Amino acid sequence: MNYAIIAAGEGSRLAQEGVAKPKPLVEINGEPMIGRLINLFRRCNAESVSIIVNEEMKEVRAYLESLQLDIPFNLVVKSTPSSMHSFYELSRVMQPGRFCLTTVDTIFREDDFRAYIQAMEADDSHDGMMAVTSYIDDEKPLYVETDADLNITAFRDAAYEGARFISGGIYALNEKAVKVLEECMEKGVSRMRNFQRALVDAGLRLKAYDLGKILDVDHADDIRKANDFLNGK
């Protein structure tokens, strides 16, 4: 599995709340968030890792360039207007084949994630497996609609009757998704949630995978929540 990390946001909310470090370098469970993901991916059969950071993140860039990894590593330094645009830049350097994409501030348990990757690697009937969660602590959650077999039928901005899951911000996909991404860029589509809708509209077969609890680190108090979560509190 190839892995990709979007770490190009400004982390302005954390800075406004007194967190001095750039978001990717904020420590969770004793590791910088971005280092934690890289190490976790390496333990989950990583064939390569690709990361994008914005042009202002000189400290993050220096940290990443100092790493000595035993797998191919691609670093893109570019400021982009959205996560979808960041994904597009990553898609131009990623190795061919299946990949798993996430944002740097997504926190999950390693055992849960490993089972998810193993499920995707063993699945030959779907074009993608999207990690979902029933834990809602997001300011603007994206609701994931499925059929009885957890095949994804739609992505919704608002809750609906019978809603069970929201997007966890972790996407395991095959190369068909990159073609859809390129079409979205050509049409001027923006935002990752609209890209996900485009995947459904294009007829890609997507499965929802319940990863359990997933947290995002957007605010200073989320750092405490993330540490407590990973330590079973």
Image: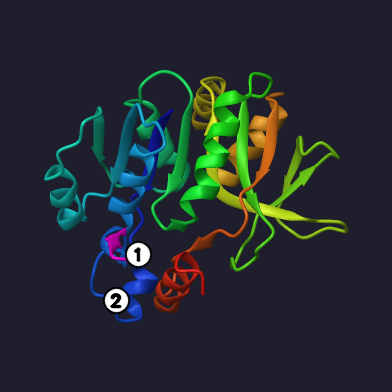
Coloring applied to the structure = rainbow
Q: Residue at x 26, y 37 (%)?
A: 76
Asked if the residues shown at circle 2 and circle 1 are in contact, with their CB atoms under 8 angstroms apart, the answer is yes
Q: Position of residue 231 (x, y in %)?
A: 45, 68
Rendered image quadrant of residue 68: top left
Q: Residue 158: x percent and y percent?
A: 74, 59
Residue 205 picture location, percent across and down? 70, 26
In the foreground, 91 or 227 = 227
Tag 2 residue: 19
- Badge 2 element: loop
Is 35 located above or below residue 203 in the figure?
below
> Callout 2: few (<14), some (14-19), or many (20+) C-alpha neighbours within 10 Å?
some
Residue 11 visible in the picture: yes
Residue at 46% x, 58% y: name it: 107
Q: Is residue 29 magenta?
A: yes
Q: Observer-nearest residue: 74 or 46? A: 46
- Above/below status of 196 relative to 216: above
Q: Of label 2 and label 1, which has the lower sequence position?
A: 1
Residue at 67 percent across and 38 percent down: it is 197
Magenta segment main secondary structure? strand
Residue drawn at x 36%, y 73% as measured from the top left: 14
| Separation of marks 2 and 1 at Cα, in angstroms | 9 Å
Nearest to the observer: residue 47 or residue 9 = 47
Magenta span: 28-32
Q: Label for residue 75?
A: none
Kind of residue indicated by mark 2: Val
**Residue type for callout 1:** Gly
Horizontally, residue 156 falls left or right of residue 61, namely right
Q: Tag on residue 11?
A: 1
